[in-house]
Image: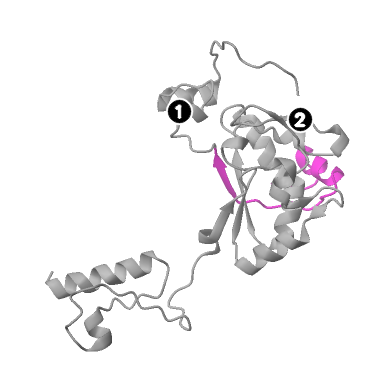
Amino acid sequence: MSEIGRRHFLYGAAAVAAGVMGTGCTPEDLTKSSDSGGVPVVAIDAQRRSFKVSPHMTGVNGAKWYDDAYGMWDSKLNRPAPGIVGKIRKSGIGMIRYPGGTSSNLFNWKGAIGPQADRTRQVEGQKGEPVDSRFGPDEYMAFIRETGATPEIMAPFANSTPQEIADWVAYMNAPQGTKWGDLRARNGHPEPYRVRYWEIGNELHGAKQRYWMSADDDKAMRQYAFGGTQRQKRQRVGTP
């Protein structure tokens, strides 16, 4: 590749990577001169859209579900917080992740559905502190409906079994006339939520986020699928 060709390619690639309409131009292109000394220029035309950006590229991580999810949920009125909904719509956020990242590694979805008085406490996955279950899967979906964003759920890896996660998928997506679809209907949501995007675990490349499981990838996957034990020392003990 010639020097001029290489420069055009790099300038254009940098502009595209930055998410703007890149012309791939050099200062010489803009000024019609060769006096710039080769300083790269990224030209932005705010009036022109050169490609469509997937709404999944503009997603955010709901980093925690407890304490009303950073104020996303108005627990006193049992509804999404209008001010937050408006800002999310205005900013064009296309996908919202639930129940969060590291803090959600020990999340128990079955303890976060149904009447608030019947819900369990949770164990926060980063500090191990007890937290609430107010903003559960049904509240999350009410928030999703208000914002128009796409839902994406992180299924905890460390303390859930494959069957528990399959049950969660069924609760969110199964029709009435099934065990979990009927339970969802009794909780006030007859129609399936049709949550398409799921992930297993959060940052599983980090051994510290595997808790009782092995740092070895193969062993950890087998422990997740088939169970196992690990001796614990000087750990907190409690009930939900």
At label 2, the amino acid type is Arg
Counting from the top left corner in percent of width and height, residue 78 is at 84, 50
Task: Tell me if residue 177 comes above or below residue 17 in the rendering.
Answer: above
- Residue sitting at x 59%, y 61%: 94
Q: Secondary structure at mark 2?
A: loop
Residue linked to disc 2: 121
Q: Nearer the viewer, residue 184 or 238?
A: 238
Q: Earlier in the sequence, mark 2 or mark 1?
A: 2
Counting from the top left corner in percent of width and height, residue 147 is at 70, 62
Instruction: Say whether residue 117 is left or right of residue 22.
Output: right
User: Which residues lie in the magenta part?
Assistant: 173-200
- Label 1 packing within 10 angstroms: few (<14), some (14-19), many (20+): some
Q: Quadrant of the C terminus?
A: top right
Quote the CA–CA distance across marks 2 and 1: 26 Å
- Residue sitting at x 57%, y 28%: 158
At label 1, the amino acid type is Ala
Identify the image quadrant of residue 131.
top right
Identify the image quadrant of residue 50.
bottom left
